[in-house]
Image: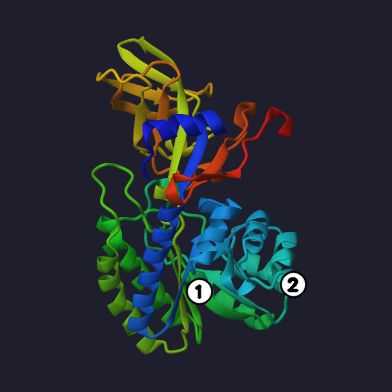
Amino acid sequence: MYLTEEQVFGLLKTYGSPLYVYDKSTIVERCQQLSIFAKRLSDAVDRAVHMHYSTKANSNVEILRLIKSNGIWADCMSPKELKLDLKAGFSPKELLYVCNNIREEEMDLVKSKDVLICLDSVSQVETWAHKSHGTKIMVRINPGTVGVGHSHKVITSGPDTKFGISEANLPQLLQLADLYSLEIVGAHQHLGSLFLNDKIDHYVAGVSAFLDIIKRNFKNLSIVDLGGGFGVPYAPEEEPLNFDILYRKLVPVLKNFVEEYPSVKEFKFEPGRFIPCEAGLLLGTVTSIKEEFDTRWIGTDIGMGTLVRPSMYGSYHKIEVIERDPSGIMVQANICGNVCESGDILGKRRIVDCPTVNDAVVVHNAGAYGYSMSSNYTGRPRPAEVMMTEKDCCRLIRPAQSLDDF
């Protein structure tokens, strides 16, 4: 997504700073890429393939409606996300409730909405079973293989993660399902968030291990969820995920599986960040400049409450400084936010245009896990969100909070 200097300053003047900006055409393009990939896989293995957008990546209801209108289904993991998905127009059959350590009251809500639930421990299945004899569920499996992800905090497979049921505990699960007449219709796995081309083989190996566990332990499953974590390039040296390579690697594995396990009728994937990430920019304002101990600091109003990924995961986001009066001078600087914590850093040792106070800052790839992970930490309101539509028009899709909103 690209904005001109005039657009950046115009948007900040109109909607305030900081500000999340999304590009409609990029979201549509990413949905189309996933739909094409799903259709190719479906044709190759002769089974239905559905993409379930992970609502937690960005839950703005206007973005959810756009994704829904482009043929993508959704998964959710909280009552709020479930309500938003239904409000956006997803039908219960187009939703999957992928949850972790939830209360009984939440299970009751999911059941009342007739949405298929995926449970990830034997004890959670037992909690569900006490009120829900004879119902259909999915279960999350931890194949034991070490997962993939951009940070150890988002790797969701392997012996050191909290997710899923290991193969060693599947006999206990199946015994419990038999006791309460539960029908386990599907199995799910998710290796982690954000893999690119260098990790495709790792992802496919994890899929193979998962499918082998299904064949050894389950009879007649109809749904197999292969997770996702489809990545996008954040750093300059990274390349976009090559779906042709992923297709070529996956097809033989899935073909072999359906031949040996003919009851499966559907494969699911859960691409979260892939759809909105590159569509989003976060705009902010330079609020201070200083040089201390031979280090230049550029202070901004984009604190960790507005974008937490760099502080929480050490994540890289491309950052630009947009000068009102270009000087042609480049500097190396640490770019930071407005929260009184040393970890409140957007980027270290970045080469940017030399700013003055009230110049603009643009943070790229902020459409996923940006606003959805934002907070009111230290009492700062969340920013507005706008959508850039056709012919460079924009539309407010969520107003900024005010202090009175608290």
Near-viewer residue (129 or 356): 356
Q: Residue at x 39, y 25 (%)?
A: 335
Q: Badge 1 is on which residue? A: 187
- Residue 116 versus residue 314 in the image, above or below: below
Colour pattern of the rendering: rainbow
Q: Quadrant of residue 288?
A: top left
Tell me which numbered mark, 2 or 1, is placed earlier along the sequence. 2
Q: Give the x, y percent position of residue 353.
A: 30, 23
Near-viewer residue (342 or 376): 376
Near-viewer residue (81 or 5): 5
Identify the amino acid type marked 1: Ala
Q: Give the x, y percent position of residue 404.
A: 73, 30
Q: Residue at x 39, y 20 (%)?
A: 298
- Residue 3 versus residue 238 in the image, above or below: above
Q: Which corner quadrant holds the C terminus?
A: top right
Q: Badge 2 is on which residue? A: 130
Q: Residue furthest front?
A: 391
Say if mark 2 contacts mark 1, CB within 8 Å.
Answer: no
Near-viewer residue (156 or 29): 29
Are there few (<14), some (14-19), or many (20+) residues within 10 Å of tag 1?
many
Secondary structure under the numbered disc 2 in the rendered image = helix
- Answer yes or no: is residue 55 visible: no
Identify the amino acid type marked 2: His
Q: Residue at x 42, y 26 (%)?
A: 360
Q: Which corner quadrant holds the N terminus?
A: top left
- Answer yes or no: is residue 211 visible: yes
